[in-house]
Image (cartoon, rainbow, N blue to C red):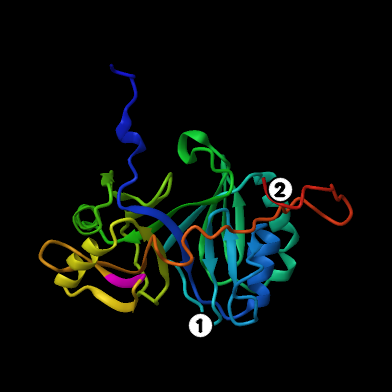
């Protein structure tokens, strides 16, 4: 019996989750103003609670923000947030606290573009079931700026090495990285800064086979432990580097996999408090 559904649209592939983006930055106070007060996200209350690192919850994903020389993601990080008007109001309120930094924001049609105090670009989208499913708060994608002529090679790399569905749309390689999450590699003629060490973290279902393929190509950059390894270089079939981005690759047996994350309701205030509305729903 033909149910009339295209079942392939539900395929995820071997990458089951884009869990976090890690960039170092020099000032935890300014990071708090931007990510917590401005964006309305939630500092993890249980892990990395000191002054030298901060984990920031975004639905089921995170930003990791260790203290260090500022790293700048070479592209755009795409979030889904529940209320763009409230977001814009919060960003307006923190402007004075972030003066003399690279902070900026601009409301567009259906999203808000914003830049962190050190130049990381974040695009905040309104919920859209056709694009993001039922997600109303979360990390939907990361989009990297890559050189011309690399998108086909990058898509092939993810298909062949990580067994992740990947396609090329125009001049952008789009890699499935979980339920309604993608890694996007957009070709550009603009100058691309040198890689400064920022990274993303992904969970994969088949953990060992990609490791074997990466190791055979000499691409494993770190042997972390039994649950994790890392690689940086994305290469073509001849082994030529197409792009560099550290991937922290974790198995589904990693102790942090599936850890529930606390997300607050940023609309709560002491002056307009509603009992029972502290948690994000």
Q: Residues within 10 Å of mark 1 (few under 14, many from 20)?
A: few
Q: Looking at the figure, which quarter contains the N terminus?
A: top left
Task: Name the image quarter holding residue 96.
Answer: bottom right
Residue 69's tag is 1
Q: Is residue 129 left or right of residue 51?
A: left
Q: Quickly name the residue at label 2.
A: 86
Residue 21, image x, y percentages:
47, 65
Mark 2 lies on a secondary structure that is: helix
Residue 72, image x, y percentages:
46, 71
Q: Residues within 10 Å of mark 2 (few under 14, many from 20)?
A: some
Question: Magenta part of the protein: which range?
Answer: 227-232
Residue drawn where x is 26% and y is 46% of the image: 168
Give the Cα distance between marks 1 and 2: 31 Å
Mark 1 or 2 closer to N-term? 1
Above/below status of 164 relative to 38: above
Mark 1 lies on a secondary structure that is: loop
Residue 150, image x, y percentages:
22, 58
Q: Residue furthest top?
A: 1
Q: Nearer the viewer, residue 213 or 237?
A: 213
Residue drawn where x is 57% and y is 53% of the image: 59
Q: Nearer the viewer, residue 160 or 209?
A: 209
Q: Nearer the viewer, residue 263 or 147?
A: 263
Residue 11, image x, y percentages:
33, 40
Residue drawn where x is 34% and y is 62% of the image: 190
Q: Is residue 234 left or right of residue 34?
A: left
Q: Nearer the viewer, residue 177 or 74?
A: 177
Q: Is residue 178 left or right of residue 173?
A: right
Q: Looking at the figure, which quarter contains the C terminus?
A: top right
Task: Name the image quarter holding residue 234.
Answer: bottom left
Most common SS among magenta residues? strand
CB within 8 Å, label 1 to label 2: no
Task: Name the image quarter holding residue 49.
Answer: bottom right
């Amino acid at each position: 019996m033909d149910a009339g559904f295209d079942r392939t649209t539900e395929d995820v592939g071997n990458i089951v989750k884009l869990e976090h983006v890690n960039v170092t930055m020099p000032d935890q106070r300014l990071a708090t103003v931007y990510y917590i007060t401005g964006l309305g996200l939630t500092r993890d209350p249980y892990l990395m609670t000191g002054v030298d690192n901060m984990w920031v919850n975004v639905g089921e994903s995170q930003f990791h923000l260790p203290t260090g020389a500022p790293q700048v993601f070479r592209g755009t990080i795409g979030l889904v947030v529940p209320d763009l008007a409230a977001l814009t109001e919060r960003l307006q309120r923190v402007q004075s606290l972030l003066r003399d930094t690279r902070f900026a924001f601009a409301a567009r049609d259906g999203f808000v573009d914003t830049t962190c105090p050190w130049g990381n670009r974040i695009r905040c989208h309104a919920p859209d079931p056709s694009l993001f499913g039922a997600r109303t708060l979360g990390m939907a994608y990361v989009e990297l700026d890559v050189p011309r002529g690399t998108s086909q090679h990058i898509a092939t790399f993810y298909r062949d090495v990580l067994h992740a569905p990947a396609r090329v749309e125009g001049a952008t390689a789009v890699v499935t990285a979980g339920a309604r999450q993608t890694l996007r590699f957009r070709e550009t003629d603009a100058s691309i800064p040198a890689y400064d060490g920022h990274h993303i973290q992904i969970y994969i279902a088949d953990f060992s086979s990609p490791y074997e393929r990466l190791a055979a190509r000499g691409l494993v950059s770190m042997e972390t432990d039994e649950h994790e390894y890392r690689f940086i270089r994305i290469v073509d079939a001849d082994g030529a580097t197409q792009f560099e981005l550290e991937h922290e690759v974790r198995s589904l047996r990693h102790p942090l996999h599936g850890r529930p994350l606390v997300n607050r309701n940023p609309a709560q205030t002491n002056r307009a408090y509603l009992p029972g509305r502290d948690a994000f729903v």
